[in-house]
Amino acid sequence: MSVGTIGIGHLDVSRFILGGNPFSGFSHQSPAVDLEMRRYYTTNRIKETLKRAEELGITTHISRADHHVMRVLLEYWDEGGSIQWIAQTCPLLGSISLGIKNAIDGGAKACFIHGGLMDYLLAHNDLDEVPVAIARIREAGMAAGIAGHNPKVFEWAEDNVGVDFYMCSYYDSAPRDERAEHVAGMEERFVPEDREAMVRVIRGLSRPAIHYKVMAGGRNDPKEAFAFVAKHLRPEDAVCVGIYTKDRPNMLEENVELLEMSLREARV
């Protein structure tokens, strides 16, 4: 299986990127499912999933820059794994600078500023540190990006900061005006209008976009979701999808196959 690659900065990135939210217990469903995911995804299960991803031609993994992720990845690489890590800064643990330091120390190839934090900073007109952070990421030899759930984040970025890539959420499920980080059990809404608004913005972006939250936290029918992605995935874009294999052991293979089929049908 193969869905091809794109270029992000100096990196060669598979168009299907393995997301890390389920590994860290972020279900976007309920606190009970969050806990279930954390219990299911032991270190060994995460490593097995990373290995299977590589066997399917997936070269890239996105997860947050915390010590749990760093430890698992270092162990996986020490055992011969080669998947490359794109790190997300983690406001729950501290500043953007700390997130970047963790990405550097943990061996990330790219780093982006957390989407909830970008939404929060935009809401408070407090974005002065973003260009400084992007410069620091690049100085460390990593590709640099920003994420967001609010399409206006990317409109601001196009005019105010140069990045290597964007992380574009299909849903603004829980506006982050009051706090940047996701809180388990917070009320979330996933409406079709959000993803329509985001893909309109993506069309005009000057850098590659990684489409994420495309499954609406498991709420969307996979076939429909990947057909929508394929329709709106530009040649320079990729998609990031997290998987939860507790009840569907072949979910990763199924998702890669669905993306391949959808891209063929959309001729992207």
Image: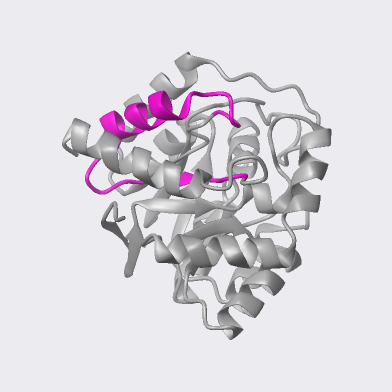
Q: Which span of residues is magenta-colored?
A: 216-244
Residue found at the very far left of the displayed protein:
267
User: Is residue 257 left or right of 107 when viewed as pictured?
Assistant: left
Magenta span includes 230: yes
Instruction: Name the quadrant containing residue 58.
Output: bottom left
Question: Where 180 falls versus 175 (above or below)?
Answer: below
Q: Quadrant of the C terminus?
A: top left
User: Is residue 64 left or right of 148 when viewed as pictured?
Assistant: right
Magenta span includes 40: no
Question: Where 266 falls versus 62 (above or below)?
Answer: above
Q: How many marks?
A: 0
Question: Where 256 falls versus 66 (above or below)?
Answer: above
**Residue 160 seen anywhere in this rendered image of the structure:** no
Q: Quadrant of the N terminus?
A: bottom left
Question: Where 2 falls versus 219 (above or below)?
Answer: below
Residue situated in front as seen by the camera: 153 or 229: 229
Q: Position of residue 146 (x, y in %)?
A: 49, 49
Q: Position of residue 49 (x, y in %)?
A: 57, 60
The colour scheme used to paint the residues is one colour
Residue at image coords 77%, 40%: 34
